[in-house]
Image: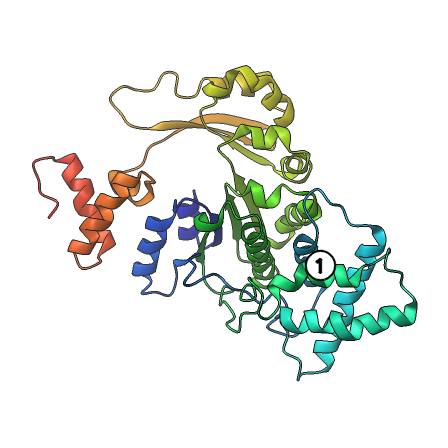
């Protein structure tokens, strides 16, 4: 589906864990001579870094301000710690005052470092003049929690990048976050900033289909701090000729999260389900949650029950707006299969062959597919 979107001219931004799109991304990268198929992965030597306070045209609209506030709130508060109303107001005022400063004083470099210094010095004096009480907004506690992201802190690189990622005109972008998927700080923050980058793309690319696909990212998005942000994304994206797609292999993620239910399921016209037989005992809950009819339930539970023994394919259920539904067989060529495979042994075989062929991944895919169709042929 993603491949077809790309071939139809859509802009695709993916947030992934597990290198699922490595082959497809590299194939696009090679075919476009490095102009597309951009693949970002997080390593200790080369971590992904951003500057959420930078805007190309210098205009901070409502969406940009809200994304900055959501980001800082995520840095500041734990998932189970809701901010007080007075704290939300103080944070909103701090962001607005800082934006006013950097738009009026071009000598101030927009980044987290200067935001931190602004709150520590100028905004502190503003609060003192207003006699804001510590119990309403503990500015020292706020600064202490955010200190790791300030100059000299453990994560000072994360929000102070001096390199702006050129995402606007790249049509196929993958952020691979497998190395930090279990990191309680880096994973949710990085995901938020990537989503904000997509919103920027969404607003500025007029008349062009664009989609964000978040694979296995529930740890990052299913938090109280993210609820309004996700809700905003899902309600807004279609107005800009865009789509938001989330993928999960764990049905418990859907059943157990009211945030997912309210923000995503209620705003999703298209639902795609794969084989659900292992969840048969829980399917009543799934049916109720997704609002499936009895007919749709029967269709879903028929998946892969009577497949043709001589062909290799999987069945998949589609529901469009609750008015149309069907089960389809998805069968791809061997060339596509080896482009998409996530099986470690198959990926190793493919990329080893590509190395032998001077890095030519496309030729390696063709050779490997042919060798499987005709075992007598050689892959070297």
Q: Nearer the viewer, residue 315 or 18?
A: 18
- Which residue is found at the position 73% from the left and 45% from the top? 81
Residue drawn where x is 44% and y is 48% of the image: 178
Residue 205 can be seen, yes or no: yes
Q: Is residue 211 above or below residue 255?
A: below
Q: Position of residue 110 (x, y in %)?
A: 64, 74
Please provide percent x and percent y for residue 149. Answer: 61, 63
Left or right: 51 in relation to 73: left
Residue furthest toward the bottom? 107
Provide the residue designation for mark 1.
69
Name the residue nearer the viewer: 143 or 293. 143
Q: Is residue 44 left or right of residue 230?
A: left
Q: As displayed, is residue 180 above or below residue 162?
A: above
Q: Secondary structure at mark 1?
A: helix
Q: From the top left corner, tell me how far across and down residue 153 is, in percent.
A: 58, 65
Residue 372 place in picture, x, y as percent? 17, 36
Against 274, residue 141 (above or below) is: below
In the rendered image, which quarter contains the N terminus?
top left
Q: Residues within 10 Å of mark 1 (few under 14, many from 20)?
A: some
Q: In the figure, residue 199 lies in which quadrant?
A: bottom right
Residue 59 shows in the view: no
Name the residue nearer the viewer: 220 or 262: 220
Q: Nearer the viewer, residue 153 or 10?
A: 153
Q: Is residue 250 above or below residue 339?
A: above
At 30% across and 45% down in the image, what residue appears? Answer: 339
């Amino acid at each position: 589906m993603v491949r077809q979107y790309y071939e139809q001219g859509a802009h695709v931004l993916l947030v992934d864990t597990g290198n699922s799109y490595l082959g497809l991304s590299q194939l696009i990268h090679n075919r476009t001579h490095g102009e597309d198929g951009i693949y970002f992965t997080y390593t200790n030597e080369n971590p992904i870094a951003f500057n959420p306070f930078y805007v190309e045209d210098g205009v901070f609209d409502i969406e940009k301000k809200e994304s900055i506030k959501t980001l800082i709130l995520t840095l500041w508060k734990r998932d189970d710690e809701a901010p007080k109303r007075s704290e939300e107001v103080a944070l909103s005022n701090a962001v607005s005052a800082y934006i006013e400063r950097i738009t009026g004083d071009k000598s101030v470099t927009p980044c987290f470092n200067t935001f931190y210094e602004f709150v520590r010095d100028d905004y502190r004096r503003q609060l003192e003049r207003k006699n804001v009480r510590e119990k309403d907004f503990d500015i020292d506690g706020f600064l202490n929690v955010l200190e790791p992201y300030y100059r000299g802190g453990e994560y000072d690189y994360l929000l102070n990048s001096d390199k702006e990622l050129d995402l606007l005109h790249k049509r196929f972008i993958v952020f691979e976050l497998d190395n930090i998927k279990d990191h309680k700080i880096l994973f949710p923050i990085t995901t938020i900033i990537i989503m904000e980058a997509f919103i920027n793309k969404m607003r500025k690319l007029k008349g062009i289909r664009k989609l964000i696909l978040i694979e296995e990212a529930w740890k990052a998005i299913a938090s109280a701090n993210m609820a309004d942000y996700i809700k905003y994304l899902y309600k807004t994206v279609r107005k800009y000729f865009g789509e938001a797609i989330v993928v999960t292999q764990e049905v418990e993620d859907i059943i157990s999260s009211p945030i997912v239910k309210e923000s995503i399921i209620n705003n999703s016209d298209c639902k795609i389900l794969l084989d659900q037989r292992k969840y048969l005992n829980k399917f009543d809950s799934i049916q109720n949650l997704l609002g499936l009819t009895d007919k749709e339930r029967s269709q879903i539970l028929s998946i892969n029950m009577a497949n043709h023994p001589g062909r290799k394919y999987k069945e998949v259920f589609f529901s469009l707006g609750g008015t149309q539904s069907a089960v389809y067989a998805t069968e791809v060529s061997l060339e596509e299969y080896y482009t998409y495979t996530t099986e470690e042994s198959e990926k190793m075989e493919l990329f080893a062959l590509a190395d032998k062929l001077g890095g030519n991944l496309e030729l390696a895919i063709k050779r490997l597919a042919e060798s499987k169709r005709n075992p007598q042929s050689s892959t070297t």
